[in-house]
Image (cartoon, rainbow, N blue to C red):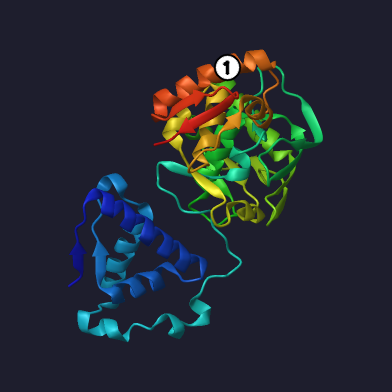
């Protein structure tokens, strides 16, 4: 019989991360769910995880394992007959060109650091959105973003992150269907006519963008949304994210953004931007207020920005518990401990 391993909550979280990475690695190497289930069955281990840190993929593996045992009427003595990784038939493997977004905790959304550390989704004043063509967006050192399209702000990032969240469970480059009301509720918006029009406008705005993003190792050229349209027959909204954008999520080049916390800051553009920027750094470095003004895309006067950033840092501290100070050299120092 499988062994149930009970662990304290902290250790369970580590195990969850360990198994999530292992499962995602196996999927990316081309193994089907059935093969993953069988291979895990050989280890004869089931990890019992607290509901608070449970993961849908783990639950799916446990379910498929049980279904596989029932379907094939396997007995414990027959598990040795299951093929090893090297014995798996090539025909049973998934297409290696099929790509998926990184798997993150259910409460978080994987977000490229190039997005969080730049003015791509900037702090734009109401009614001040402009059309840009081939604009080099301000970023931290090491990144490069060239952008053409209507200027994007933090509300557009709310929408784009929801598109990313909904695309996590399917193959990149395939259609993701959604109901507008459900989408709006997910980003803490009302569902009236004006909000439907606002959502449609934001999605179209990102559909008609042209960006070149590079971190020195990779370059992605394309739009933020490959396609967006409405299926009049089924009554669904549909979107597709270009599978080539996966390069923006390579290795440690992305950050898991807390979905609920970010939405708690909705309407406070600079505070939202600061949350994303500092979330992308394990140990934030001191940075001048003038530099933050530049890479956040704010078009406010420096004097006004100083006032704004003090207020935003206080708001950020109240929801995250992070401490901060502005030193005598006009540098912002944030401590996340």
Residue sitting at 24 percent across and 49 percent down?
9
The residue sitting at 33% across, 71% down in the picture is 40
Q: Is residue 181 visible?
A: no
Q: Toward the viewer: 101 or 139? A: 139
Of residues 285 and 186, the one drawn nearer to the viewer in this rendering: 285
- Per the image, the residue denoted by label 1 is 308
Q: Residue at x 37, y 56 (%)?
A: 17
Name the image quarter holding residue 259: top left
| Total tally of numbered discs in the picture | 1
Which element carries disc 1, helix, strand or loop? helix
The x, y position of residue 121, in whole percent, is 64, 33
Residue 193 image offset from top left, x and y in percent: 57, 21
Q: Examine the image and state in which quarter residue 306 appears.
A: top right
- Say left or right for 22 vs 165: left
Decide: is 38 above or below 251: below
x 59%, y 50%: residue: 175
Vertical side of 34 occupied by 167: above or below: above
Vertical order, 118 against 100 (above or below)? above
Q: Furthest-front residue in view?
A: 328
Residue 311 in percent (x, y) is at 51, 17
């Amino acid at each position: 019989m499988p062994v149930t391993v009970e662990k304290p909550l902290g250790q369970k979280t580590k195990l969850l991360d360990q198994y999530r990475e292992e499962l995602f690695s196996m999927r990316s190497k081309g193994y089907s769910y059935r093969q993953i289930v069988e291979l895990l069955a050989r280890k004869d281990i089931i990890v019992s995880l607290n509901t608070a840190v449970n993961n849908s993929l783990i639950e799916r593996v446990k379910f498929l394992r049980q279904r596989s045992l029932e379907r094939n009427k396997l007995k414990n003595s027959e598990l040795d007959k299951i093929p090893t990784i090297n014995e798996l038939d090539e025909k049973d493997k998934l297409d290696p060109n099929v790509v998926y977004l990184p798997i993150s905790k259910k409460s978080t959304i994987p977000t490229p650091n190039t997005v969080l550390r730049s003015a791509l989704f900037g702090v734009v004043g109401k009614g001040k959105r402009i059309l840009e063509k081939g604009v080099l967006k301000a970023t931290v050192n090491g990144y490069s973003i060239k952008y053409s399209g209507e200027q994007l702000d933090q509300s557009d990032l709310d929408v784009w992150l929801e598109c990313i969240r909904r695309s996590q469970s399917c193959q990149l480059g395939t259609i993701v269907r959604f109901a507008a009301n459900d989408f709006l509720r997910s980003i803490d918006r009302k569902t009236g006519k004006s909000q439907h029009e606002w959502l449609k406008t934001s999605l179209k705005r990102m559909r008609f963008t042209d960006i070149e993003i590079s971190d020195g190792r990779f370059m992605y050229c394309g739009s933020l949304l490959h396609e967006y349209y409405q299926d009049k027959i089924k009554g669904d909204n549909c979107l597709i994210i270009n599978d080539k954008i996966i390069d923006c999520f390579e290795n440690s080049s992305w950050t898991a953004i807390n979905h609920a916390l970010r939405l708690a800051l909705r309407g406070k553009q600079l505070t939202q931007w600061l949350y994303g920027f500092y979330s992308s750094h394990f140990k934030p470095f001191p940075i001048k207020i003038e530099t933050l003004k530049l890479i956040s895309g704010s078009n406010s006067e420096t004097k006004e920005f100083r006032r704004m950033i003090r207020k935003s840092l206080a708001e950020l501290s109240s929801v995250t518990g992070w401490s901060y100070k502005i030193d005598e050299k006009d540098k912002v120092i944030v401590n996340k401990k």
